[in-house]
Image (tube, rainbow, N blue to C red):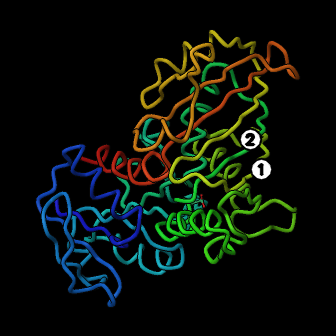
Amino acid sequence: MRIGIVGATGAVGQETIQVLKDRRFPVTELHLFASERSAGKTTETAFGPVTIEAFSVEATRAMDIVFLAVSGDFAKEFAPAISSAGGAIVIDNSSAFRYDDAVPLVVPEINGRRALGQTLIANPNCTTAILLMALAPLHAEFGVKRAIVSTYQAASGAGAEGMTELAEGAREFLAGQPVTASKFAHPLAFNLIPHIDSFQDNGYTREEMKVLWETRKIMEAPEVLLSCTAVRVPTMRAHAEAVTIETLRPITPAAARAVLAKTPGVQVTDDPAAKLYPMPLTASTKYDVEVGRIRESLVFGDTGLDFFVCGDQLLKGAALNTVQIAEILI
Ligand code: 2RA
């Protein structure tokens, strides 16, 4: 397959190259597209040295599959032209088409069949993809009526620059210097910031609303009620989420563990006595999403559950999920 990656120099673009290699995706040609500024530079990749090309619709249309790891505005402008008749299949990591009824929003383990026969497919927000790895199988078995989610989101959600800002901020803080902030609304090192993406009229941020909108679309469950508080935390590349659910049918921790244990892409990490639970450090660079701290809800009793999820934001939250979508298509 001729593969194009647009936004190849960013954190998600770089991770996509590595995932294609690690999963032995049948790449015959790898074309990396970026801005004019990066074009002409040669970069070392898992497939050997590749010279970066300036983006053009014509060049990307000549690919079999194009991964877009760029902004929503860019995707909105160019994805339809790249994927129209005779062009390439586009897998878009931005939010540009996620809420478009004509474009499937896909987590392969949950609704992979939706990608079949499509030429433009949207990849969910990282927070949603990681959450749904646990929520969707529980919904299928027990029926999720309501969910309350609190997130602990890593710096990688703001790209490579976000990760650099956290590392530099930590050094500045420990050196007793003022911590600078540009990618984040405030210094992130040794801090928590309950503000990801823009605030909406209802007081929630767009990041928080995305989790509701995308959960309903992917699970095909418009009736599910969900509220989210999204918080940026000073971890590097794995998002964590504390989740409380109320279910339609009775649920026990043992029954939930049994369902999750047979869910592809999930690793039940749940032995508190052995200090085993999901954590960003253990979930980082791992394909599977860790789920643990599974316990009966003190609020909802036998129709409720509390649990903790942790997944690599750059992998299941982005690059891995997009490559898995491509795998369905071939
Ligand atoms: C974040 N969810 O963590 C966003 C990235 N897609 O900032």
Q: Residues within 10 Å of mark 2 (few under 14, many from 20)?
A: many
Residue type highlighted by circle 1: Thr
Ligand 1 sits in which quadrant?
bottom right
Q: Percent x, y for residue 130?
A: 55, 42
Q: Residue at x 53, y 63 (%)?
A: 167
The image quadrant of residue 296 is top right
| Position above or below: 100 against 212 | below
Q: Residue at x 63, y 50 (%)?
A: 214
Circle 2 sits in a helix, a strand or a loop, which is it?
strand
Q: Which one is nearer the viewer's eye here, 84 or 248?
A: 248
Disc number at residue 213?
A: none
Q: Residue at x 40, y 69 (%)?
A: 10
| Position above or below: 324 against 306 | below
Residue type highlighted by circle 2: Val
Q: Which one is nearer the viewer's eye here, 228 or 290?
A: 290
Q: Percent x, y for residue 309?
A: 60, 34
Q: Percent x, y for residue 158?
A: 56, 65
Q: Residues within 10 Å of mark 1 (few under 14, many from 20)?
A: many
Residue contact at pointers 2 and 1, CB within 8 angstroms = yes
Q: Residue at x 62, y 10 (%)?
A: 255
Q: Is residue 180 left or right of residue 22?
A: right
Q: Percent x, y for residue 93?
A: 46, 61
Residue to which mark 1 is pinned: 229
- Which residue in the rendered view is the most extreme toward the bottom? 36
Circle 1 sits in a helix, a strand or a loop, which is it?
strand
Q: Is residue 230 left or right of residue 238?
A: right
The image quadrant of residue 185 is bottom right
**In the rendered structure, which disc, 2 or 1, sits on the residue that comes first in sequence?**
2
Residue to which mark 2 is pinned: 149
| Position above or below: 49 against 300 | below
